[in-house]
Protein backbone atom coordinates (compact mmCIF):
# COMPACT_ATOMS: atom_id res chain seq x y z
CA UNK A 1 0.00 0.00 0.00
CA UNK A 2 1.28 3.48 -0.86
CA UNK A 3 -1.18 5.69 1.06
CA UNK A 4 1.66 7.50 2.83
CA UNK A 5 2.80 8.88 -0.51
CA UNK A 6 -0.54 10.64 -1.02
CA UNK A 7 -0.02 14.37 -0.53
CA UNK A 8 -2.59 16.99 0.50
CA UNK A 9 -3.56 18.85 -2.71
CA UNK A 10 -2.23 22.32 -3.49
CA UNK A 11 -4.34 25.45 -3.03
CA UNK A 12 -5.05 25.67 -6.76
CA UNK A 13 -6.29 22.06 -6.86
CA UNK A 14 -8.49 22.58 -3.77
CA UNK A 15 -10.14 25.57 -5.44
CA UNK A 16 -10.64 23.72 -8.74
CA UNK A 17 -12.35 20.89 -6.78
CA UNK A 18 -14.56 23.48 -5.00
CA UNK A 19 -15.40 25.02 -8.42
CA UNK A 20 -16.47 21.58 -9.64
CA UNK A 21 -18.68 21.05 -6.56
CA UNK A 22 -20.28 24.50 -7.00
CA UNK A 23 -20.92 23.76 -10.69
CA UNK A 24 -22.67 20.54 -9.62
CA UNK A 25 -24.72 22.46 -7.02
CA UNK A 26 -26.11 24.69 -9.78
CA UNK A 27 -27.75 21.52 -11.17
CA UNK A 28 -29.27 20.64 -7.77
CA UNK A 29 -30.12 23.95 -6.04
CA UNK A 30 -33.02 25.83 -7.69
CA UNK A 31 -32.14 29.13 -9.37
CA UNK A 32 -33.72 32.23 -7.88
CA UNK A 33 -33.27 35.96 -7.41
CA UNK A 34 -34.37 38.88 -5.27
CA UNK A 35 -35.29 42.14 -6.97
CA UNK A 36 -32.60 44.73 -6.33
CA UNK A 37 -32.60 48.48 -5.73
CA UNK A 38 -29.74 50.86 -6.53
CA UNK A 39 -29.35 54.63 -6.40
CA UNK A 40 -28.41 56.53 -9.57
CA UNK A 41 -26.18 59.38 -8.38
CA UNK A 42 -26.45 61.32 -11.66
CA UNK A 43 -30.23 61.14 -12.18
CA UNK A 44 -30.88 61.12 -8.38
CA UNK A 45 -33.43 58.33 -8.76
CA UNK A 46 -33.78 54.72 -7.65
CA UNK A 47 -33.41 51.90 -10.19
CA UNK A 48 -35.39 48.77 -9.35
CA UNK A 49 -34.16 45.71 -11.23
CA UNK A 50 -36.53 42.73 -11.52
CA UNK A 51 -36.26 39.56 -13.56
CA UNK A 52 -36.80 41.10 -16.99
CA UNK A 53 -37.61 44.72 -16.22
CA UNK A 54 -35.80 47.77 -14.95
CA UNK A 55 -37.94 50.51 -13.39
CA UNK A 56 -36.99 54.05 -12.41
CA UNK A 57 -38.51 55.15 -9.10
CA UNK A 58 -38.37 58.49 -7.25
CA UNK A 59 -35.58 58.61 -4.66
CA UNK A 60 -37.85 59.25 -1.65
CA UNK A 61 -38.46 57.74 1.76
CA UNK A 62 -41.97 56.80 0.57
CA UNK A 63 -40.47 54.61 -2.17
CA UNK A 64 -38.31 52.80 0.42
CA UNK A 65 -41.28 52.36 2.79
CA UNK A 66 -43.44 50.95 -0.02
CA UNK A 67 -40.74 48.36 -0.76
CA UNK A 68 -40.49 47.48 2.99
CA UNK A 69 -36.89 48.72 3.07
CA UNK A 70 -36.35 50.25 6.51
CA UNK A 71 -33.32 52.34 5.58
CA UNK A 72 -33.22 56.17 5.74
CA UNK A 73 -33.07 57.80 2.28
CA UNK A 74 -29.92 59.70 3.37
CA UNK A 75 -27.94 56.45 3.41
CA UNK A 76 -28.39 56.23 -0.39
CA UNK A 77 -28.02 59.92 -1.28
CA UNK A 78 -24.85 60.31 0.84
CA UNK A 79 -23.20 57.35 -0.92
CA UNK A 80 -23.08 55.23 2.28
CA UNK A 81 -24.92 52.46 0.38
CA UNK A 82 -23.33 52.37 -3.06
CA UNK A 83 -24.10 48.80 -4.16
CA UNK A 84 -27.50 47.38 -5.24
CA UNK A 85 -29.40 45.97 -2.24
CA UNK A 86 -31.82 43.03 -2.14
CA UNK A 87 -35.50 43.98 -1.73
CA UNK A 88 -37.21 41.93 1.04
CA UNK A 89 -40.02 39.51 0.09
CA UNK A 90 -39.30 39.69 -3.66
CA UNK A 91 -37.54 36.32 -4.06
CA UNK A 92 -38.70 34.43 -7.13
CA UNK A 93 -37.65 31.02 -8.37
CA UNK A 94 -36.27 31.10 -11.89
CA UNK A 95 -35.56 28.66 -14.67
CA UNK A 96 -32.48 26.65 -13.72
CA UNK A 97 -29.16 27.97 -14.97
CA UNK A 98 -26.96 24.88 -14.53
CA UNK A 99 -23.26 25.50 -15.12
CA UNK A 100 -21.85 22.78 -17.34
CA UNK A 101 -18.33 21.70 -18.25
CA UNK A 102 -17.64 24.76 -20.45
CA UNK A 103 -18.68 27.17 -17.66
CA UNK A 104 -16.55 25.20 -15.17
CA UNK A 105 -13.47 25.41 -17.44
CA UNK A 106 -14.04 29.13 -18.09
CA UNK A 107 -14.63 30.04 -14.42
CA UNK A 108 -10.93 30.39 -13.42
CA UNK A 109 -10.30 32.59 -16.48
CA UNK A 110 -13.34 34.77 -15.71
CA UNK A 111 -12.23 34.89 -12.07
CA UNK A 112 -8.71 36.03 -13.00
CA UNK A 113 -10.19 38.80 -15.20
CA UNK A 114 -12.63 39.82 -12.43
CA UNK A 115 -9.86 39.85 -9.80
CA UNK A 116 -7.35 41.69 -12.03
CA UNK A 117 -7.12 44.62 -9.59
CA UNK A 118 -5.90 42.57 -6.61
CA UNK A 119 -3.80 40.31 -8.88
CA UNK A 120 -1.83 43.30 -10.20
CA UNK A 121 -1.36 44.55 -6.64
CA UNK A 122 0.17 41.18 -5.70
CA UNK A 123 2.45 41.08 -8.79
CA UNK A 124 3.71 44.67 -8.33
CA UNK A 125 4.40 43.95 -4.63
CA UNK A 126 6.35 40.87 -5.77
CA UNK A 127 8.38 43.12 -8.08
CA UNK A 128 9.06 45.56 -5.24
CA UNK A 129 10.23 42.68 -3.00
CA UNK A 130 12.53 41.53 -5.84
CA UNK A 131 14.14 44.99 -5.98
CA UNK A 132 14.49 45.06 -2.16
CA UNK A 133 16.22 41.66 -2.18
CA UNK A 134 18.62 42.89 -4.87
CA UNK A 135 19.64 45.93 -2.77
CA UNK A 136 20.37 43.78 0.32
CA UNK A 137 18.36 46.21 2.47
CA UNK A 138 16.08 43.44 3.76
CA UNK A 139 18.94 41.23 4.89
CA UNK A 140 20.71 44.08 6.69
CA UNK A 141 17.45 45.30 8.26
CA UNK A 142 16.49 41.81 9.47
CA UNK A 143 19.96 41.24 10.94
CA UNK A 144 19.71 44.56 12.81
CA UNK A 145 16.17 43.84 14.06
CA UNK A 146 17.06 40.31 15.22
CA UNK A 147 19.89 41.79 17.28
CA UNK A 148 17.74 44.62 18.67
CA UNK A 149 14.95 42.23 19.75
CA UNK A 150 17.23 39.57 21.25
CA UNK A 151 15.53 38.13 24.35
CA UNK A 152 12.37 40.20 23.73
CA UNK A 153 11.15 38.63 20.49
CA UNK A 154 7.63 38.13 21.91
CA UNK A 155 7.13 41.93 21.55
CA UNK A 156 7.19 41.39 17.78
CA UNK A 157 4.22 39.00 18.01
CA UNK A 158 2.13 41.37 20.15
CA UNK A 159 3.03 44.45 18.10
CA UNK A 160 2.36 42.98 14.64
CA UNK A 161 -0.90 41.23 15.64
CA UNK A 162 -2.30 44.31 17.42
CA UNK A 163 -1.33 46.76 14.66
CA UNK A 164 -2.81 44.58 11.90
CA UNK A 165 -5.98 44.04 14.00
CA UNK A 166 -6.22 47.81 14.44
CA UNK A 167 -6.11 48.21 10.65
CA UNK A 168 -8.78 45.51 10.26
CA UNK A 169 -11.20 46.99 12.80
CA UNK A 170 -10.86 50.58 11.53
CA UNK A 171 -10.62 50.47 7.73
CA UNK A 172 -10.94 46.78 6.82
CA UNK A 173 -7.28 45.85 6.32
CA UNK A 174 -7.63 42.45 4.61
CA UNK A 175 -6.48 41.99 0.99
CA UNK A 176 -3.70 44.51 1.64
CA UNK A 177 -2.06 42.14 4.17
CA UNK A 178 -0.89 40.01 1.21
CA UNK A 179 1.88 42.63 0.98
CA UNK A 180 3.09 41.99 4.54
CA UNK A 181 3.87 38.26 4.32
CA UNK A 182 7.07 38.37 2.20
CA UNK A 183 8.37 41.24 4.35
CA UNK A 184 7.54 40.16 7.90
CA UNK A 185 7.87 36.35 7.71
CA UNK A 186 11.72 36.55 7.43
CA UNK A 187 11.72 38.79 10.53
CA UNK A 188 9.83 36.14 12.54
CA UNK A 189 12.17 33.41 11.29
CA UNK A 190 15.21 35.54 12.23
CA UNK A 191 13.66 35.91 15.70
CA UNK A 192 13.88 32.06 16.02
CA UNK A 193 10.18 31.44 15.41
CA UNK A 194 8.72 29.53 12.45
CA UNK A 195 6.84 30.92 9.45
CA UNK A 196 3.53 29.76 11.00
CA UNK A 197 3.93 32.32 13.82
CA UNK A 198 4.40 35.15 11.32
CA UNK A 199 1.50 33.92 9.19
CA UNK A 200 -0.76 33.71 12.28
CA UNK A 201 0.15 37.20 13.52
CA UNK A 202 -0.63 38.83 10.16
CA UNK A 203 -3.58 36.72 8.97
CA UNK A 204 -5.29 36.31 12.37
CA UNK A 205 -4.64 39.95 13.25
CA UNK A 206 -6.42 41.06 10.10
CA UNK A 207 -9.20 38.45 10.47
CA UNK A 208 -9.91 39.36 14.11
CA UNK A 209 -9.89 43.07 13.29
CA UNK A 210 -12.42 42.66 10.47
CA UNK A 211 -14.48 40.13 12.46
CA UNK A 212 -14.84 42.61 15.34
CA UNK A 213 -15.04 45.70 13.15
CA UNK A 214 -15.73 48.90 15.07
CA UNK A 215 -15.61 51.69 12.46
CA UNK A 216 -14.79 49.63 9.33
CA UNK A 217 -16.79 51.19 6.44
CA UNK A 218 -16.74 47.93 4.44
CA UNK A 219 -18.57 45.88 7.09
CA UNK A 220 -19.90 47.60 10.24
CA UNK A 221 -20.99 50.86 8.63
CA UNK A 222 -22.34 49.46 5.37
CA UNK A 223 -24.14 46.59 7.21
CA UNK A 224 -25.67 48.93 9.81
CA UNK A 225 -26.80 51.29 7.04
CA UNK A 226 -28.36 48.41 5.12
CA UNK A 227 -30.07 47.24 8.34
CA UNK A 228 -31.53 50.72 8.84
CA UNK A 229 -29.71 51.50 12.10
CA UNK A 230 -26.93 53.87 13.15
CA UNK A 231 -23.50 52.21 13.01
CA UNK A 232 -22.76 53.33 16.61
CA UNK A 233 -25.54 51.03 17.88
CA UNK A 234 -23.78 48.01 19.41
CA UNK A 235 -20.34 49.62 19.06
CA UNK A 236 -19.38 49.07 22.73
CA UNK A 237 -20.20 45.36 22.50
CA UNK A 238 -18.11 44.96 19.34
CA UNK A 239 -15.18 46.77 20.96
CA UNK A 240 -15.31 44.45 23.99
CA UNK A 241 -15.53 41.47 21.64
CA UNK A 242 -12.40 42.73 19.84
CA UNK A 243 -10.47 42.83 23.16
CA UNK A 244 -11.67 39.32 24.17
CA UNK A 245 -11.00 37.60 20.82
CA UNK A 246 -7.64 39.38 20.31
CA UNK A 247 -6.45 38.48 23.84
CA UNK A 248 -7.36 34.76 23.44
CA UNK A 249 -5.67 34.62 20.01
CA UNK A 250 -2.51 36.37 21.24
CA UNK A 251 -2.17 33.93 24.15
CA UNK A 252 -2.61 31.03 21.71
CA UNK A 253 0.05 32.36 19.27
CA UNK A 254 2.49 33.21 22.10
CA UNK A 255 2.11 29.72 23.58
CA UNK A 256 2.84 28.05 20.23
CA UNK A 257 5.72 30.48 19.51
CA UNK A 258 7.38 29.78 22.86
CA UNK A 259 7.14 26.03 22.26
CA UNK A 260 8.76 26.36 18.81
CA UNK A 261 11.50 28.64 20.10
CA UNK A 262 12.41 26.23 22.92
CA UNK A 263 12.33 23.22 20.60
CA UNK A 264 12.20 23.87 16.80
CA UNK A 265 11.14 20.23 16.19
CA UNK A 266 7.77 21.09 17.84
CA UNK A 267 6.96 23.30 14.83
CA UNK A 268 4.04 22.05 12.72
CA UNK A 269 6.10 22.93 9.63
CA UNK A 270 9.49 21.67 10.91
CA UNK A 271 9.86 19.39 7.87
CA UNK A 272 9.79 22.55 5.67
CA UNK A 273 12.29 24.56 7.73
CA UNK A 274 15.10 24.58 5.14
CA UNK A 275 12.72 25.03 2.19
CA UNK A 276 11.08 28.11 3.77
CA UNK A 277 14.41 29.63 4.83
CA UNK A 278 15.66 29.24 1.25
CA UNK A 279 12.41 30.75 -0.08
CA UNK A 280 12.98 33.90 1.97
CA UNK A 281 16.73 33.99 1.18
CA UNK A 282 17.66 33.27 4.81
CA UNK A 283 20.27 30.59 4.12
CA UNK A 284 23.16 33.01 3.93
CA UNK A 285 24.74 34.48 7.06
CA UNK A 286 23.55 38.00 7.88
CA UNK A 287 25.87 38.60 10.84
CA UNK A 288 28.39 40.61 8.81
CA UNK A 289 25.84 42.81 7.02
CA UNK A 290 26.12 46.51 7.83
CA UNK A 291 23.04 48.73 7.81
CA UNK A 292 24.51 51.68 5.87
CA UNK A 293 22.81 55.06 5.48
CA UNK A 294 21.86 54.20 1.88
CA UNK A 295 20.19 50.96 3.03
CA UNK A 296 18.44 52.90 5.82
CA UNK A 297 17.06 55.34 3.21
CA UNK A 298 15.87 52.41 1.06
CA UNK A 299 14.10 50.84 4.07
CA UNK A 300 12.54 54.25 4.88
CA UNK A 301 11.14 54.59 1.32
CA UNK A 302 9.88 51.00 1.49
CA UNK A 303 8.16 51.58 4.87
CA UNK A 304 6.70 54.90 3.72
CA UNK A 305 5.05 53.20 0.73
CA UNK A 306 2.99 51.12 3.18
CA UNK A 307 2.20 54.12 5.39
CA UNK A 308 1.04 56.05 2.29
CA UNK A 309 -1.07 53.06 1.20
CA UNK A 310 -2.77 52.82 4.63
CA UNK A 311 -3.44 56.58 4.78
CA UNK A 312 -4.75 56.51 1.20
CA UNK A 313 -7.16 53.63 1.83
CA UNK A 314 -8.41 54.92 5.17
CA UNK A 315 -8.62 58.67 4.39
CA UNK A 316 -8.52 59.33 0.64
CA UNK A 317 -10.90 56.70 -0.82
CA UNK A 318 -7.99 54.89 -2.49
CA UNK A 319 -8.44 51.41 -3.86
CA UNK A 320 -6.36 48.91 -5.84
CA UNK A 321 -5.17 51.17 -8.70
CA UNK A 322 -3.81 53.79 -6.28
CA UNK A 323 -2.30 51.18 -3.93
CA UNK A 324 -0.58 49.35 -6.80
CA UNK A 325 0.76 52.62 -8.24
CA UNK A 326 2.25 53.52 -4.83
CA UNK A 327 4.30 50.30 -4.74
CA UNK A 328 5.41 50.71 -8.37
CA UNK A 329 6.68 54.25 -7.68
CA UNK A 330 8.41 53.01 -4.49
CA UNK A 331 10.23 50.29 -6.51
CA UNK A 332 11.44 52.87 -9.06
CA UNK A 333 12.64 55.32 -6.35
CA UNK A 334 14.50 52.49 -4.56
CA UNK A 335 16.08 51.52 -7.90
CA UNK A 336 17.45 55.07 -8.27
CA UNK A 337 18.70 55.23 -4.65
CA UNK A 338 20.46 51.86 -4.99
CA UNK A 339 21.86 52.87 -8.44
CA UNK A 340 20.55 49.66 -10.01
CA UNK A 341 21.17 49.39 -13.77
CA UNK A 342 17.99 49.46 -15.87
CA UNK A 343 18.45 45.91 -17.22
CA UNK A 344 19.10 44.54 -13.70
CA UNK A 345 16.07 46.44 -12.35
CA UNK A 346 13.72 44.94 -14.95
CA UNK A 347 15.14 41.45 -14.40
CA UNK A 348 14.86 41.62 -10.57
CA UNK A 349 11.37 43.18 -10.74
CA UNK A 350 10.11 40.51 -13.18
CA UNK A 351 11.65 37.71 -11.12
CA UNK A 352 10.04 39.06 -7.92
CA UNK A 353 6.65 39.35 -9.62
CA UNK A 354 7.05 35.84 -11.04
CA UNK A 355 7.55 34.39 -7.54
CA UNK A 356 4.03 35.56 -6.60
CA UNK A 357 2.37 34.45 -9.85
CA UNK A 358 1.06 31.28 -8.15
CA UNK A 359 -0.61 33.44 -5.50
CA UNK A 360 -2.20 35.60 -8.20
CA UNK A 361 -3.68 32.47 -9.85
CA UNK A 362 -5.13 31.33 -6.51
CA UNK A 363 -6.91 34.67 -6.04
CA UNK A 364 -8.33 34.43 -9.57
CA UNK A 365 -9.50 30.81 -9.22
CA UNK A 366 -11.19 31.67 -5.88
CA UNK A 367 -13.04 34.54 -7.59
CA UNK A 368 -14.07 32.08 -10.30
CA UNK A 369 -16.08 30.14 -7.68
CA UNK A 370 -18.18 33.30 -7.09
CA UNK A 371 -18.60 33.71 -10.87
CA UNK A 372 -20.07 30.18 -11.11
CA UNK A 373 -22.54 30.90 -8.29
CA UNK A 374 -23.61 34.22 -9.77
CA UNK A 375 -24.10 32.72 -13.23
CA UNK A 376 -25.93 29.73 -11.72
CA UNK A 377 -28.22 32.08 -9.71
CA UNK A 378 -27.96 30.03 -6.50
CA UNK A 379 -26.67 32.68 -4.02
CA UNK A 380 -30.08 34.33 -3.54
CA UNK A 381 -31.77 30.92 -3.22
CA UNK A 382 -29.50 30.02 -0.33
CA UNK A 383 -30.17 33.42 1.27
CA UNK A 384 -33.94 32.96 0.89
CA UNK A 385 -33.95 29.52 2.54
CA UNK A 386 -31.58 30.71 5.28
CA UNK A 387 -33.97 33.58 6.10
CA UNK A 388 -37.02 31.28 6.37
CA UNK A 389 -35.29 28.85 8.80
CA UNK A 390 -35.26 31.28 11.74
CA UNK A 391 -38.95 32.32 11.87
CA UNK A 392 -40.51 32.10 15.36
CA UNK A 393 -37.35 30.92 17.14
CA UNK A 394 -36.35 31.48 20.75
CA UNK A 395 -34.01 34.50 20.67
CA UNK A 396 -31.08 32.63 22.27
CA UNK A 397 -31.34 29.88 19.63
CA UNK A 398 -32.03 32.46 16.90
CA UNK A 399 -28.82 34.42 17.45
CA UNK A 400 -26.64 31.28 17.32
CA UNK A 401 -28.41 29.90 14.25
CA UNK A 402 -27.81 33.27 12.54
CA UNK A 403 -24.11 32.99 13.42
CA UNK A 404 -23.88 29.63 11.62
CA UNK A 405 -26.04 30.81 8.71
CA UNK A 406 -23.65 33.69 8.11
CA UNK A 407 -20.67 31.36 8.49
CA UNK A 408 -22.18 29.10 5.81
CA UNK A 409 -23.16 31.95 3.48
CA UNK A 410 -19.62 33.36 3.67
CA UNK A 411 -18.36 30.32 1.75
CA UNK A 412 -20.50 31.47 -1.18
CA UNK A 413 -20.18 35.24 -0.58
CA UNK A 414 -16.71 35.88 0.93
CA UNK A 415 -16.90 39.68 0.38
CA UNK A 416 -17.93 41.57 3.55
CA UNK A 417 -19.52 44.51 1.70
CA UNK A 418 -21.17 42.17 -0.82
CA UNK A 419 -22.61 40.07 2.02
CA UNK A 420 -23.86 43.18 3.83
CA UNK A 421 -25.83 44.75 0.97
CA UNK A 422 -27.18 41.42 -0.26
CA UNK A 423 -28.32 40.00 3.09
CA UNK A 424 -29.01 42.84 5.53
CA UNK A 425 -32.27 44.15 3.98
CA UNK A 426 -33.57 40.54 4.02
CA UNK A 427 -32.11 39.35 7.36
CA UNK A 428 -32.39 42.44 9.59
CA UNK A 429 -36.25 42.43 9.75
CA UNK A 430 -35.99 38.92 11.28
CA UNK A 431 -34.63 40.58 14.45
CA UNK A 432 -37.99 42.38 14.88
CA UNK A 433 -39.91 39.08 14.72
CA UNK A 434 -37.98 37.51 17.63
CA UNK A 435 -37.65 40.67 19.74
CA UNK A 436 -33.93 41.50 19.48
CA UNK A 437 -32.21 44.67 18.22
CA UNK A 438 -31.09 44.83 14.60
CA UNK A 439 -27.51 45.43 15.75
CA UNK A 440 -27.58 41.74 16.81
CA UNK A 441 -27.98 40.76 13.14
CA UNK A 442 -25.05 43.04 12.25
CA UNK A 443 -23.00 41.28 14.96
CA UNK A 444 -23.91 37.75 13.80
CA UNK A 445 -23.02 38.78 10.24
CA UNK A 446 -19.60 40.08 11.32
CA UNK A 447 -18.77 37.22 13.69
CA UNK A 448 -20.06 34.45 11.40
CA UNK A 449 -18.21 35.84 8.38
CA UNK A 450 -15.09 36.56 10.48
CA UNK A 451 -14.85 33.19 12.20
CA UNK A 452 -15.31 31.17 9.02
CA UNK A 453 -12.77 33.46 7.30
CA UNK A 454 -10.05 31.73 9.38
CA UNK A 455 -10.57 28.54 7.34
CA UNK A 456 -12.64 29.65 4.32
CA UNK A 457 -10.94 28.34 1.14
CA UNK A 458 -12.83 30.87 -1.02
CA UNK A 459 -11.40 33.74 1.08
CA UNK A 460 -7.75 34.82 1.34
CA UNK A 461 -6.27 32.00 3.43
CA UNK A 462 -5.12 29.84 0.48
CA UNK A 463 -3.42 32.81 -1.21
CA UNK A 464 -1.74 33.75 2.09
CA UNK A 465 -0.53 30.18 2.64
CA UNK A 466 0.83 30.01 -0.92
CA UNK A 467 3.17 32.96 -0.27
CA UNK A 468 4.70 31.05 2.66
CA UNK A 469 4.48 27.63 0.91
CA UNK A 470 2.49 26.14 3.82
CA UNK A 471 -0.18 23.51 3.08
CA UNK A 472 -3.84 24.08 4.00
CA UNK A 473 -3.77 20.85 6.04
CA UNK A 474 -0.95 22.24 8.24
CA UNK A 475 -2.82 25.50 8.73
CA UNK A 476 -5.93 23.54 9.81
CA UNK A 477 -3.80 21.58 12.30
CA UNK A 478 -2.55 24.86 13.78
CA UNK A 479 -5.83 26.82 13.79
CA UNK A 480 -8.47 24.19 14.70
CA UNK A 481 -8.09 24.32 18.54
CA UNK A 482 -8.19 28.14 18.50
CA UNK A 483 -11.11 28.13 16.03
CA UNK A 484 -13.19 25.88 18.33
CA UNK A 485 -12.41 28.07 21.38
CA UNK A 486 -13.37 31.28 19.52
CA UNK A 487 -16.62 29.77 18.16
CA UNK A 488 -17.68 28.74 21.70
CA UNK A 489 -16.73 32.15 23.17
CA UNK A 490 -18.64 33.94 20.38
CA UNK A 491 -21.75 31.80 20.94
CA UNK A 492 -21.60 32.54 24.68
CA UNK A 493 -21.20 36.31 24.15
CA UNK A 494 -24.03 36.45 21.60
CA UNK A 495 -26.37 34.44 23.84
CA UNK A 496 -25.69 36.72 26.82
CA UNK A 497 -26.13 39.84 24.65
CA UNK A 498 -29.73 39.02 23.64
CA UNK A 499 -30.83 38.49 27.25
CA UNK A 500 -29.18 41.61 28.73
Image: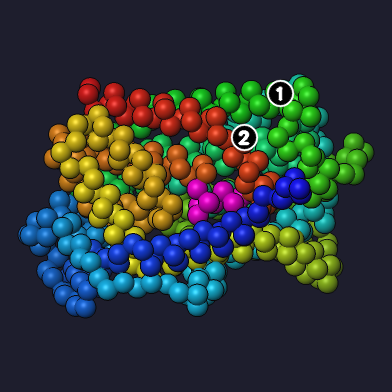
What is the spatial separation of the Cα atoms under label 2 and label 1, in whole angstroms?
13 Å
Above or below 173: residue 12: below
Q: Residue at x 36, y 63 (%)?
A: 28
Whether residue 164 is visible, yes or no, is no
Picture coordinates of residue 428 (x, y %)?
Answer: 22, 46
Placement of 409 over or under 28, stated as above or below: above
Q: Which residue is mark 2?
A: 478
Q: Which element type, helix, strand or loop, lies under badge 1? A: helix
- The one nearer the camera, 123 or 381, is 381
Q: Is residue 67 left or right of residue 141?
A: left
Q: Quadrant of residue 210?
A: top left
- Residue topped by disc 1: 259
In the rendered image, the quadrant that contains the C terminus is: top left
Mark 2 secondary-structure assignment: helix
Foreground pick, 488 / 220: 488
**Among the two numbered marks 2 and 1 on one chain, the one whose residue lies closer to the N terminus:** 1
Residues at marks 2 and 1 touching, judged by CB atoms closer than 8 Å: no
Horizontal relation, residue 309 to residue 223: left or right = right
**Which residues, given as a range, are shown in magenta?**
456-464
Q: Residue at x 43, y 32 (%)?
A: 487
Report x, y in % for residue 120.
Answer: 60, 66
Amino acid sequence: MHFKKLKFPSAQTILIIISGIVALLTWIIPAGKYDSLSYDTEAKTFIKTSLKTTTTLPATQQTLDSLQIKIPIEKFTSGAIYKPIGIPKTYQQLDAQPQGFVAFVQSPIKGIIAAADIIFLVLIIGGLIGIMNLTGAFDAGIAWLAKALEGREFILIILVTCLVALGGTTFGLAEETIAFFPILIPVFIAAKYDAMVGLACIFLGSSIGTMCSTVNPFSTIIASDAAGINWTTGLTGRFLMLIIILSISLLYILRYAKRVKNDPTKSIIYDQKEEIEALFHLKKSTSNLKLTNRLRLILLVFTLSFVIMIVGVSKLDWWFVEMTSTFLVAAIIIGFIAKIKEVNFVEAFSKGAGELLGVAFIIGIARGVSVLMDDGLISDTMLYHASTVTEGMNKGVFVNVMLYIYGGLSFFIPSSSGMAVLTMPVMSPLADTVGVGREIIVNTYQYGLGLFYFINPTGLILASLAIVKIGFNKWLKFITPLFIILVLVTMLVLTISVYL
